[in-house]
Amino acid sequence: MTYTLKSIEPQPNRIAVVTGANVGLGYETAKALASKELTVILACRNLDKAKKAMDRIKKSHPEAKLDALALDLCSNKSIHSFVSAYNSKYKSLDLLINNAGVMMPPYAITEDGLESQMAANYFGHFLLTSLLLPTIEKTRGSRIVALSSLAHAWGEIDFEDINSEKHYNPKTVYGQSKLACLMFAYELARQLQERNYQTQSLAAHPGVTITEIGRNL
């Protein structure tokens, strides 16, 4: 049985948040969800780029219900501000897609003292999900989706040097970040089931695609 976008029924009363939705997989995901009548919030670091992405989506889907909110996953302050802004406008959240990420950038430390690749790919999404969880949990049939990668097999979690201060291997740290995301998705799924919540935590592998995430290769 083939399952495609055409297989999905319109869902006009549902709300989705997609991180990194201005380009690549995030953009295509936001566009697809908008075509199914969901209200889609583009959670992006650059609001100008997010608004341009919204304009592109509306060219093919004029009736699309779109919103853009600023979100920098490398800034705890920005994440808290995003959640506050979201909760002031929306009272439920059906679908959180943790899509945004970076791959093998030069070594950098964020304003919160975290290695930037781990911050953008894992720690930021962990905090975002944790802060949105009360809203998600009260939304019946809600989903939390982590974008996974076979790169999780490249490394293991180095708890003794989580910021890679002793040695920074971009490939290994990318693998570590994707492994952390996968472990989080699994553990969150276990805890939600244990607490009998209707929310599901899932990991989805998008396959191999050419997007801007490979700009540092």
Image: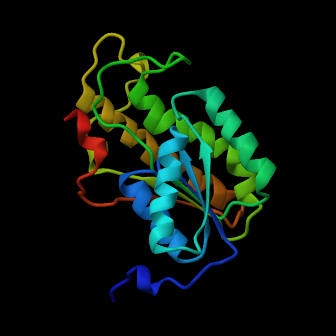
Q: In this view of the protein, which residue sits in the foreground, 8 or 190?
A: 8
Q: In this view of the protein, which residue sits in the foreground, 96 or 154?
A: 96
Percent coordinates x, y for residue 140 in the rendering: 72, 69
Residue 157 at least partly seen: yes
Q: In the displayed structure, would residue 195 be above or below residue 154? A: below
Residue drawn at the location 25% of the way across and 42% of the way down = 214
Residue furthest top as drawn: 166
Residue 185 at least partly seen: no
Q: In the displayed structure, would residue 184 be above or below residue 9? A: above
Residue drawn at the location 69% of the way across and 50% of the way down = 133
Taking the image as shown, residue 52 lies to the left or right of residue 130, namely left
Q: In this view of the protein, which residue sits in the foreground, 145 or 17?
A: 17
Tell me how the rendering is colored: rainbow
Taking the image as shown, residue 55 lies to the left or right of residue 143, namely left
Hey, which quadrant is residue 40 in on the image? bottom right
Percent coordinates x, y for residue 149 in the rendering: 32, 50
Hey, which quadrant is residue 25 in on the image? bottom left
Hey, which quadrant is residue 205 in on the image? bottom left
Taking the image as shown, residue 155 lies to the left or right of residue 127, namely left
Residue drawn at the location 64% of the way across and 61% of the way down = 193
Taking the image as shown, residue 209 lies to the left or right of residue 178, namely left
Residue furthest bottom as drawn: 1
Quadrant for the N terminus in the image: bottom left
Percent coordinates x, y for residue 7 in the rendering: 45, 86
Residue drawn at the location 52% of the way across and 43% of the way down = 48
